[in-house]
Image (spheres, helix red, strand yellow):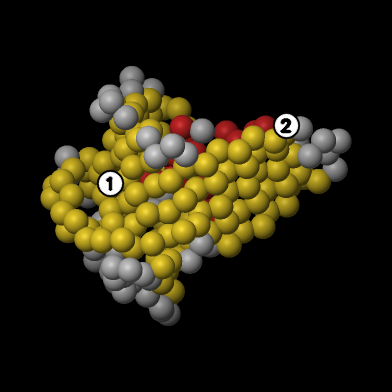
Amino acid sequence: MRKLIYTLFLIVCGTASVMAQCNEYYQFGEGNEWEFESYNAKGKLTGKNHQKVTSFEKTSNGFVAAVKSTFYDDKKKETMTGDLEFKCEGGTMYIDMRNFISDEQLKAFGTQELAVDSENLEIPSNLSVGQSLKDGSVKVTASGSGIPMAITVNITNRKVVGKESITTPAGTYDCFKITSDIATVTQMGIKMNVNISSIEWITPKLGVVKSESYNKNDKLMGYTLLSSWK
């Protein structure tokens, strides 16, 4: 679950390069890279995530980019790697919700044939306080299995609730504050539900520079900070 939370918060990010001006908050260019540090509720480092743009293609009204994402634990040991896809069209950033199902989770399905149904997250370029943002969802289901096998992630109640100045190891930024609810349902014979809430701080060009996750009792579980970019 910890790695899924990592992915949920770190997957929505950008770089400072102005090689692609499609969305004010997500500006990608081939070779750009950035790193995040994650901490538990007590402020202890739990791991890092390094992301790098590996391919980039301009389109008539935006771009498509592939990003390699590598996770490390607090001992700097690599724990997971994967490829993410981002698309921007007409000023709106589309984030494929399939990216929120990790390779580690997919291994639980074994060799079963999988069906994927998803609704992308959207990040408009014109954010404003009080604005509601579109929900996102993804469901992966195994067909032909003797027992019900599925993973569902829903991100709902996405709202821009304010503006704040945020300081991270990478600098100080003026940000919009966005809240959302995240529900994960895993069914591998036994059904398990995990519900958390999140707060993200998003700034022009760099995207999300800080995020926090809370359990169903509104207790802080951990947070993530942008530590470097280039």
Residue picked out by circle 2: 190
Q: Earlier in the sequence, mark 1 or mark 2?
A: 2
Q: Is residue 65 left or right of residue 109?
A: left
**Residue 138 position (above or below residue 133):** above
Task: Tell me the amino acid under the disc marked 2.
Answer: Ile
> Does 32 appear above or below 128?
above
Residue 132's place in the image compared with 77, above or below, is below
Q: Residue furthest front?
A: 217
Residue 70: give x, y in percent of width and height. Answer: 41, 37
Residues packed near mark 1 inside 10 Å, few (<14), some (14 to 19) or many (20 plus): many
Residue at the image point whose x is 43% and y is 54% from the top: 180
Tell me the residue at 28%/57% (across/down).
177
- Residue identifier under label 1: 210
- x and y percent of residue 23 in the render? 33, 70
Give coordinates of residue 171: x percent, y percent: 14, 47
Along the line of sight, the residue nearer the viewer: 185 or 98? 185
Query: How many residues crowd around disc 2 within 10 Å: few (fewer than 14), some, or many (20 or more)?
Result: few
Residue 85, placed above or below residue 227: below
Residue 136 in picture, x, y percent from top left: 53, 59
**Separation of disc 1 and disc 2 at Cα?**
34 Å
**Residue mark closest to the camera, 1 vs 2:** 2
- Taking the spot 37% from the left edge, 35% from the top edge, the residue there is 219
* SS at mark 1 in the image: strand
Secondary structure, mark 2, is strand
Residue 81 is marked as: none
Amino acid type of the residue tagged 1 in the rendering: Lys
